[in-house]
Image: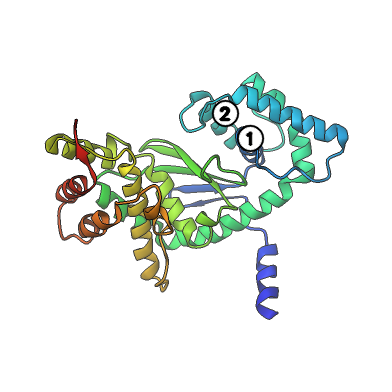
Amino acid sequence: MIAAAALATAMAIAGPASIGVERYHLQSNAWVNLHQRLMYEARFGDVPPLEGLSGDEAATWKAAVDAYRAWLGKRSPIMDSELIALNKSLSETRGGRAPKGIPDAAAKALLPAMPLYGKEQWAADDRANRFWISVAQPLLASAASELIAAHERAYGVPFPKRIRVDVVSYGWEFGAYTVGDGEAVHAVIQSTDPGSQGFAALEALMHEPSHGIVEPDHGAIGADLARAAAELKVQPPYNLWHALLFYTSGELTRRALAARGVPNYTPVIQVGMFDRQFKGFREAFDAHWRAWLDGKTTREEAMRQIVLATSRPVP
């Protein structure tokens, strides 16, 4: 009973809505949260209805979702320049007014939906987001510099210099995504996703910015894969680059946490991913990429051996 009461008290304490740590800026922003919720509901649909809406209010919300569905189409917020720009504009907005210059179709949905979202849902979403930030902040304060240096060594390129993180209730298809490059990235991370809560928040905050420097066929990992594949005349699996990204951030985070008295952290990739989308990669990663992280081989040789172990000959 005492432990439960203490946990309830801790969760009732609101964390900061916006905070800077190292090169990170974490925030809970109502406009971004509304935009991400509307996108998710428009594309995927499985969103609990906002409780407390009257008949007319429910119709207004449905109209906003329908408008977003028509405007969104089959586009992705990771690839589409208009969606990327809108999320950035909303992220930089302070106060209750929507930014000027956003697409008319988006504004016509966001503006009538915001009063309803603010009345029925924003307080709960903001509470969860602030709590996530309050957990992530000390993890970053303790380990970010060390982990950034470890990632730079692993990849051989500088980590993104400016990292904006919008903490949200819905983070697109998989609970998080990132756009940007080595200078600046903008990440969206879902506070309610178990895969990025607790100590896993630290891994997410390393994994997501890594997307600014890791690419499928160029940049960190991608360039190494392409070079090794060309030399060996093989075709690597399409998702090998992403698996290595997951493995790198997970393993480096595990080591950083172990050095801080957390000996049993399990990286996200180890929770079933090697049995699903990354099946067949575990042995090569443990043998060769871990050896590179341990300083027992070169990055080039590790990548060569991984490509050999996981690829098929070019037809």
Q: Nearer the viewer, residue 35 or 147?
A: 35
Mark 1 residue element: helix
Q: Residue furthest right?
A: 55
Q: Position of residue 89 (x, y in %)?
A: 57, 30
Residue at the location (65% across, 67% down)?
10
Residue 16 can be seen in this image = no
Task: Classify residue 295 as left or right of residue 246.
Answer: left
- Give the Cα distance between marks 2 and 1: 9 Å
Mark 2 residue element: helix
Q: Residue furthest bottom?
A: 2
Disc 1 residue type?
Answer: His
Q: Nearer the viewer, residue 182 or 283?
A: 283
Q: Nearer the viewer, residue 173 or 206?
A: 173
Q: Which quarter of the figure has residue 218?
A: top left
Q: Position of residue 175 (x, y in %)?
A: 53, 46
Q: Residue furthest top?
A: 104
Q: Which quarter of the figure is the N terminus placed in?
A: bottom right
On the image, numbered disc 1 is attached to which residue?
A: 35
Choose the circle earlier in sequence order: 2 or 1: 1
Q: Which quarter of the figure has residue 236?
A: top left
The colour mode here is rainbow
| Residue 55 versus residue 244 in the image, above or below | above
Q: Position of residue 48 (x, y in %)?
A: 71, 45
Mark 2 or mark 1: which is in front? Answer: 1
Q: Which quarter of the figure has residue 66?
A: top right
Q: Position of residue 108 (x, y in %)?
A: 71, 23
Disc 2 residue type?
Answer: Leu
Q: Are marks 2 and 1 in contact (CB under 8 Å)?
A: yes
- What label sits on residue 86 in the rendered view? 2
Residue at the location (72% across, 36% down)?
96
